[in-house]
Amino acid sequence: MRRFLLACGLTLFALAGHADTAAPVAADPVLEERVMALSHKLRCLVCQNQSIAESDADLAVDLRGQVREQLSAGRSEDEIADYMVARYGDFVLYEPPMRASTLLLWLGPIVLAVVGIGVLMIRLARRNKESAPALDEAQRARARALLEENDNDGTQA
């Protein structure tokens, strides 16, 4: 019984320690929708594969708070995104703009796919050349005769 009570107490203590990570909700539901919509467009700089809306990292919570404050102050989504880019760089955006500095981000996957398909085609062509032995005229004549004989019998190969 003691162990059970101790386990319950430790669980409550742990939950109380994480209570401050819950996303604060604005009193205005329309404002909260705008906060979450913009938060889905911004990358968590700690997690890097999640938006700040999805992440529970302390930085993501702080950034959501900044977005909420700036929207409450009347700034537009574009102004807030520009502020975040000025502060953290294009990496903070899930869809970075097409610029010379981000060209590799946009074209890199396409170039890699084209190169990969090209290498695969070359390897397959080489393998087919190596596996198919060249026939001399006598062998070709024999093959033709076998095929004609098979056609005359009315059977199919």
Image: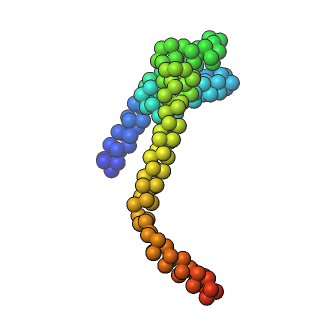
Q: Position of residue 88 (x, y in %)?
A: 47, 18
The answer to whether one can see residue 82 in this image is yes
Residue at 48% from the left image edge and 24% from the top image edge = 91
145 or 4: nearer the viewer = 145
Q: Is residue 46 left or right of residue 82?
A: left
Q: Nearer the viewer, residue 82 or 157?
A: 157
55 lies left or right of 17: right
**Residue 39 placement: quadrant:** top right
Q: Quadrant of residue 46?
A: top left
Q: Position of residue 40 (x, y in %)?
A: 57, 29
Residue at 54% across, 13% down: 83
| Vertical comparison of 13 with 28: above or below | below
Residue that protrudes farthest toward the left in the picture:
2
125 or 53, nearer to the observer: 125
Q: Is residue 23 above or below residue 127?
A: above
| Total numbered badges shown on the rendered structure | 0
Q: Which residue lies most toward the bottom here?
A: 153
Q: Residue at x 62, y 28 (%)?
A: 37
Q: Residue furthest right?
A: 30
Q: Horizontally, is 105 left or right of 130 in the view? A: right
What scheme was used to colour the molecule? Answer: rainbow
Residue 76's x, y, as percent?
65, 15
Q: Residue 7: where, in percent of width, then height?
A: 34, 44
Could you tell me if residue 56 is visible in this image?
Answer: no
Q: Quadrant of the C terminus?
A: bottom right
Residue 155 occupies which quadrant of the picture?
Answer: bottom right
Q: Residue furthest front?
A: 137
